[in-house]
Image (cartoon, helix red, strand yellow):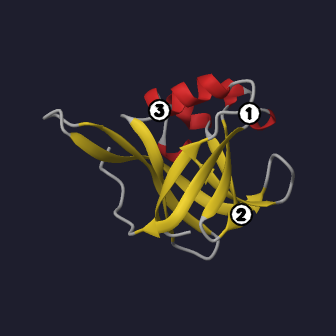
Amino acid sequence: MKGEYSGKTLTVGVLALSVDVYTHHFFGPGRWLGKAFFPFEKDKGWGYNIFSGKGKDRKEVLYRVRKMNTYIGKSLIDGKDSFHLDYRPHNSGTVHSMHDELRKINDNIFLGMGYMALGGGSINPAPFLIIGPAAKWVGADKE
């Protein structure tokens, strides 16, 4: 995966409402819109999340923050290969324990399962979609 993709939360499961509230109001500096990825090796890379919020002048602005490292590895959910998004190296607080896994459905749809220690870890993942085609990679904001 390379470039910026749009995203959509899927409000299902026991924690559906709280996951949606967290994702759009506490995870970043605005409403979550998607993720971006940049591979720098065959099975490793990094990326960030994209949010829409209000800038200093109160105009709508995009924020590219909440960086993560990416790699291919065994899923903590079912042991099969997944595309992992590891937030530990770049974040603190509750986001430090956050981890996502993506699986390709087709060339433009990827099913994600996100989890963090606060929500029970990999035994209680929150589903989301990453949707292509990808837009051009822009790069993360300086945090």
Badge 3 element? helix
The quarter of the displayed image where residue 118 is located: top right
Q: Residue type at mark 2?
A: Ile
Which x, y percent locates residue 82? 74, 59
Q: Residue type at mark 3?
A: His
The quarter of the displayed image where residue 140 is located: bottom left
Q: Residue type at mark 1?
A: Gly
Disc 3 designates what residue?
Answer: 24
Q: Earlier in the sequence, mark 2 or mark 1?
A: 2
Q: Earlier in the sequence, mark 3 or mark 1?
A: 3
* Above or below, 22 relative to 75: above
Q: Nearer the viewer, residue 10 or 3?
A: 10
**Left or right: residue 103 compared with residue 141:** right
**Left or right: residue 56 compared with residue 54:** left
Q: How many marks?
A: 3
Which x, y percent locates residue 80? 84, 59
Q: CA distance from mark 3 to mark 2?
A: 24 Å
- Residue at x 31% of width, y 51% of height: 141
Which x, y percent locates residue 101? 69, 51
